[in-house]
């Protein structure tokens, strides 16, 4: 469509268009990489324009002017999210930050809690019906445009046309400025690759095939998604599409066909990345761009089954409070979309949220897991909202856990050199018991190879993994749930009390090499309960003693045999040649398990009613 022929009265130069902005106006500017650079430049360079209040979500072009005293005397900047380019200016008090959930901003414009006189936006050229596209910036831009008295649009052929609610007719625009220029690009900086790889490894463990994902703002969420390349049929419902997702689109890892809400569609409201990404999004019908009041609405998010929110944080305290928008008193980013998506994921059937955070900052000098948030730091996500926290040292499950359990979970995934200190600080605050043993300072990444799964004949699945300090409470429940006979067969006495000292010693003695304890976990609602425990402990340099306990209603389903197989594999890796065991003679089920696994085992009966069992491992034949 030729605009000069269709609506010549609307077509202006950039310089003439900004003269429509009156002094004292409240001006909205489109978001992030979709912002109209030429219009911003023209407005700022027109010295007759005075006393303007600018509202924007993510700002880039303004960073070029914000250190100019003349600019600051004419413009006040209010941002809903502080971009990296504007961070220093925020620290210096040159801009104003509005902490609000992204899902609520469109309503704020609509209700005129924030009145808008002018909206500066960028659109693609209109089609032959007169429809332009907001392209990669729909989020709050759509609402800002609809609720401003005057709309000035930069018409840029470089702006991708996107599907969804991005379509705007030229009748809704007051003035049109034709100007071609490259769309802003947003490429992540290079960070600690080892930390990214390890966090990506743990995120991969948590994300199942067919899940629908949200990827939060920031370099870390963008970087870790590449470690999901082995997944199948992932879906996307997220605020922002970034370059990290592009390989997953191209490899057909993201198909969206398992989504329960808008299947086969990528739902988003922003796109920030490279020209390659913009070209991929351009006129691509799998992308469905909606405004933030839809994309970020927790009730809408929850309609996606198996929804997983992945976002980052600046620091986390031992109770699970998360800070995302400030470093102490210095505002750093924004509340953004994190809380919206975390609450939506909590309401999703099978959904949960993941906070990813490096364990340290400033070259390992400062722990990001802290006894308390820094003075002045804001709580963006409350301790009641948190599900899972991941660092490069592991996965902490926080959902519905007590303060004691949270401390133990988080201390375990903190940097090893801060773990003892965190435990001591937690004791001072009476979060944990005074005699609490700190978790090991070992790097336990190697334990991830020791994760197994067994499907039972009743259709249930049991997950097996090494015992961790945070399992203390759940193991207590396990022992107390057992019948007297099971306890007697395991401990050779009718033990009635399983003290904290015993349970602490159980995990404290596990070094995962000379002493190993495995637990079997079965899903009960959103909680995993322990249903089996198997362990070995060094007897001498060649032998390790084994023992097992399995919930009575699961006897005869092969659980003990499966645990024995796992423990033998690990014992061999640690150079043991055989297992030994002491079994009560009447415990025929256990003896049968050993005999089946080790036909050549030696069974030596003592006069006290016990059987000593020696089980040599079958060594591979030497060719």
Image (spheres, rainbow, N blue to C red):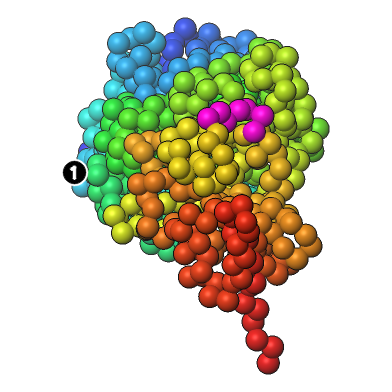
Q: For mark 1, does the 10 Å Cα neighbourhood hold few (<14), some (14 to 19), or many (20 or more) residues?
A: few
> At 57% across and 21% down in the image, what residue appears?
403
Instruction: Check the image and report above or below for 53 versus 540.
Output: above
Name which residue lies at 66% across and 56% down. Answer: 545
Q: Is residue 597 magenta?
A: no
Instruction: Please determine whether, in this image, residue 330 is positioned above or below residue 336.
Output: above
Residue at the location (56% across, 28% down)? Answer: 497
- Left/right placement of residue 439 relative to residue 296 reads right
Residue 501 within the segment the image draws in magenta: yes
Give, as a single range, the part of the protein colored magenta: 496-502
Q: Height in image: 582 above or below 315?
A: below
Residue 116 in the image: x percent, y percent?
Answer: 38, 14
Give the residue pinned by disc 1: 129
Q: Is residue 323 visible?
A: no
Residue 535 at x, y percent in the picture: 60, 52
- Reply above or below: 329 against 620: above
Q: Quadrant of residue 65?
A: top right
**What is the quadrant of residue 432 in the picture?**
top right
Q: Quadrant of residue 327?
A: top right
Q: Please provide percent x and percent y for residue 106.
A: 34, 21
């Amino acid at each position: 469509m030729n605009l000069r022929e269709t609506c010549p009265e609307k077509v202006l130069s950039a310089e003439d268009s900004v003269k429509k902005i009156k002094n004292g106006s409240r001006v909205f500017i489109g978001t992030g990489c979709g912002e109209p650079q030429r219009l911003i430049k023209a407005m700022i360079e027109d010295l007759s324009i005075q006393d303007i209040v600018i509202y924007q979500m993510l700002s880039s072009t303004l960073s070029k002017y914000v250190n100019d005293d003349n600019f600051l005397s004419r413009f006040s900047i209010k941002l809903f999210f502080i971009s990296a380019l504007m961070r220093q200016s925020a620290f210096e008090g040159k801009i104003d930050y509005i902490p609000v959930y992204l899902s609520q901003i469109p309503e704020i414009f609509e209700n005129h809690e924030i009145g808008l006189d002018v909206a500066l936006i960028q659109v693609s050229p209109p089609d032959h019906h007169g429809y332009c596209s907001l392209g990669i910036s729909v989020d709050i831009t759509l609402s800002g445009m609809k609720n401003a008295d005057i709309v000035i649009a930069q018409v840029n052929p470089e702006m991708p046309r996107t599907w969804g609610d991005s379509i705007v007719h030229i009748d809704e625009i007051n003035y049109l400025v034709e100007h071609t220029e490259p769309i802003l690009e947003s490429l992540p900086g290079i960070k600690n690759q080892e930390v990214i790889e390890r966090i990506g490894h743990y995120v991969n463990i948590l994300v199942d095939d067919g899940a629908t994902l949200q990827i939060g703002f920031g370099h870390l969420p963008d970087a870790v998604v590449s470690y999901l390349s082995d997944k199948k049929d992932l879906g996307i419902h997220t605020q922002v599409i970034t370059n990290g997702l592009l390989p997953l689109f191209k490899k057909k890892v993201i198909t969206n066909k398992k989504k329960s809400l808008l299947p086969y569609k990528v739902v988003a409201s922003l796109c920030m990345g490279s020209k390659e990404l913009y070209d991929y999004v351009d006129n691509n019908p799998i992308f469905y761009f909606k405004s933030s009041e839809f994309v970020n609405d927790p009730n809408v998010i929850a309609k996606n089954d198996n929804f997983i929110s992945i976002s980052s944080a600046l620091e986390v305290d031992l109770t699970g409070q998360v800070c995302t928008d400030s470093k102490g008193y210095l505002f750093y980013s924004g509340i953004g979309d994190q809380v919206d998506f975390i609450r939506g994921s909590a309401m999703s059937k099978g959904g949960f949220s993941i906070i990813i955070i490096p364990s340290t900052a400033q070259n390992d000098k400062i722990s990001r897991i802290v006894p308390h948030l820094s003075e002045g730091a804001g709580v963006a996500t409350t301790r009641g909202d948190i599900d899972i926290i991941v660092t490069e040292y592991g996965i902490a499950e926080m959902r519905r856990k007590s303060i004691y359990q949270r401390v133990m979970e988080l201390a375990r995934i903190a940097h090893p050199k801060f773990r003892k200190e965190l435990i001591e600080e937690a004791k001072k605050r009476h979060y944990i018991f005074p005699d609490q043993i700190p978790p090991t300072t070992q790097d336990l990444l190697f334990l991830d190879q020791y994760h197994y799964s067994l499907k039972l004949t009743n259709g249930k699945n049991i997950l097996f993994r090494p015992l961790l300090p945070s399992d203390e409470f759940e193991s207590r429940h396990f022992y107390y749930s057992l019948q007297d006979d099971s306890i007697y067969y395991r401990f050779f006495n009718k033990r009635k009390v399983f003290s904290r000292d015993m349970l602490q010693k159980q995990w404290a003695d596990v070094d995962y090499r000379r002493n190993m304890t495995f637990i079997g976990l079965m899903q009960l609602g959103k909680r995993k309960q322990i249903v089996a425990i198997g362990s070995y402990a060094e007897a001498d340099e060649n032998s390790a003693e084994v023992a097992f306990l399995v919930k009575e209603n699961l006897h005869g389903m092969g659980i003990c045999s499966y645990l024995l197989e796992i423990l033998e594999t690990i014992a061999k890796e640690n150079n043991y040649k055989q297992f030994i065991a002491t079994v009560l003679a009447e415990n025929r089920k256990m003896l049968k398990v050993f005999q089946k696994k080790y036909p050549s085992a030696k069974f030596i009966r003592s006069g006290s009613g016990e059987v000593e069992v020696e089980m040599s491992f079958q060594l591979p034949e030497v060719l």
